[in-house]
Image (cartoon, rainbow, N blue to C red):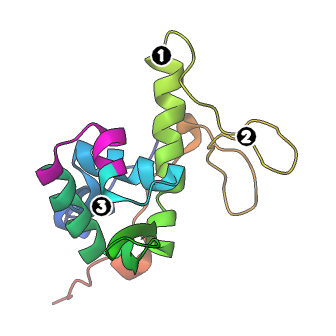
Amino acid sequence: MTGELDPRSAWTASRCSIARTLEVVGARSTFLIMREAFYGTTRFDDFVERAGLSESVTAGRLKELVAEGLLEREDYREPGQRTRRRYRLTAKGADLVPTLVSFMQWGDRWLADDGGAVKLQHRDCGEPVGVELRCAAGHPVGADELELAVPKRSRRRTRTA
């Protein structure tokens, strides 16, 4: 990665999108619940079981994810049963799918001896799916080709005397 953020006063950690995102989804339990929602889990008991979390942690995280707009809660009722709630990804939550896939891809490559427990494939053609960086013109971009820059709208205006 090249470039530098000078003057440093034009950029502060409090305005960092990575830091702000971690405030919302930074807990391990949050990623596990979002993984399960992405896999199609909708019921509380299934989140508890599949994510391997306690009921209290799961309940707290689901409440936070609903409050943040990543999941929505809706009532449903199976015949002869009481009304229950299920959880579904919102558009905001679905926008995290590439992040989840990139975590999976990295873990499969660097941490899984067997290449990972599940694979993602394109429903239409069956080919493997992965995450990659591309510029707006469509070119693949490696980490060594990235350059840091502060958008003009983010730069502080300085007064001249």
Report which residue position mark 1 lands on.
Answer: 112
> Is 139 on the left-hand or right-hand side of 5?
right
- As measured in the structure, the alpha-carbon distance from the residue carrying label 2 to the one carrying label 3 is 27 Å
Looking at the rendered image, the disc whose residue lies closer to the viewer, 2 or 3, is 2
Image height of 138 relative to 115, above or below = below
Report which residue position mark 3 lands on.
Answer: 21
Secondary structure found at label 2: loop
Residue 85: image location, x then y, percent: 34, 72
Of callouts 1 and 2, the N-terminal one: 1
Q: Main secondary structure of the magenta part?
A: helix
Tell me the kind of residue under disc 2.
Gln
Secondary structure found at label 1: loop
- As measured in the structure, the alpha-carbon distance from the residue carrying label 1 to the one carrying label 3 is 26 Å
Of all residues shown, which one is farthest toward the top?
Answer: 113
- As measured in the structure, the alpha-carbon distance from the residue carrying label 1 to the one carrying label 2 is 18 Å
Of all residues shown, which one is farthest toward the right?
Answer: 125
Residue 69, image quadrant: bottom left
> Is 62 on the left-hand or right-hand side of 122?
left
Image height of 115 relative to 27, above or below = above
Q: Is residue 26 visible?
A: yes
**Residue at image point 45% right, 72% down:** 92
Tell me the kind of residue under disc 3.
Thr
Mark number, residue 131: none
Residue 75, image quadrant: bottom left
